[in-house]
Image: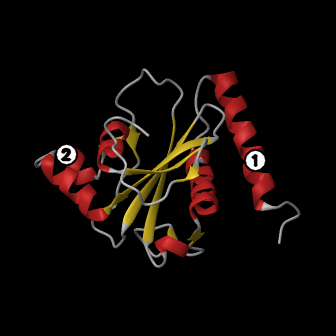
Amino acid sequence: MGVYSVDKLISEARRLAAEFRRTTGKPLPGVSGEIAEHDAARLLNLELCSERPGGFDAIGKGRRDGRRVQIKGRVIFDEEKSGQRVGQLKLEQDWDSVVLVIMDENYEPYEIFEAAREDIEDAMNDTGNSARKKRGAMTVARFKIISQLVWTREEGEIDDAPWDNQTGP
């Protein structure tokens, strides 16, 4: 067991990643995914898998009990820039939903969206036979349209009430 708690290490990773980006103009590779996994588990009552069985990163507890969840993270540095992509969705593997943690320039979460497997598969089928579909690629904007907002910085976890992605909360 290490000297530092995981929470402390993630906090320091946030600080370092933000400072690296401000200094170099480039994101620090791989950090946003680790931070997103930690935040999703903490904020949505998920248990991260110590061994990755393939296809999912965590198992739900509470209202997501038993759900196999893929966790993706995206840092939005410029709201005006379009075309940002969600990491590769592993369509050939077993999972139940995908959680997308949206972070600000300080690598702090401000929104979390969740989409069911069926909704993702339907959206990918709508794209036809494209190379994007084969790679399991989707834009953040498209993911937001097909998913449900499940957590915000201001409100915390949002209950199961219907939410209209078109007009916002």
Q: Quadrant of the C terminus?
A: top left
Total marks placed: 2
Q: Which residue is mark 1?
A: 11
Point 30% across, 43% down: residue: 145
Residue 67's spot in the image, x, y percent? 43, 74
Instruction: Give the side of residue 100 with respect to residue 165, left or right.
Output: right
Which element carries disc 2, helix, strand or loop?
helix
Q: Nearer the viewer, residue 113 or 74?
A: 113
Q: Residue furthest front?
A: 161
Who's the residue at 41% across and 48% down the image? 87
Q: Nearer the viewer, mark 2 or mark 1?
A: 1
Q: Taking the image as drawn, is residue 60 in sight?
A: no
Horizontal relation, residue 98 to residue 45: left or right: left
At x 15%, y 45%, the residue is: 127
CB within 8 Å, label 2 to label 1: no
The amino acid beneath tag 1 is: Ser
Task: Label 1: state its secondary structure.
Answer: helix
Q: Is residue 42 above or below residue 26?
A: below
Q: Which mark is residue 133?
A: none
Quarter of the rendering occupied by the N terminus: bottom right
On the image, the x and y values in percent for residue 78 come to 50, 23
Corner quadrant of residue 2: bottom right
Q: Determine which residue is flagged by label 2.
A: 131
Residue depicted at 43% across the width and 60% down the height: 160
User: Is residue 41 visible in this depiction of the protein?
Assistant: yes
* Viewer-closest of 118 and 86: 118
Query: Residue type at mark 2?
Result: Ala
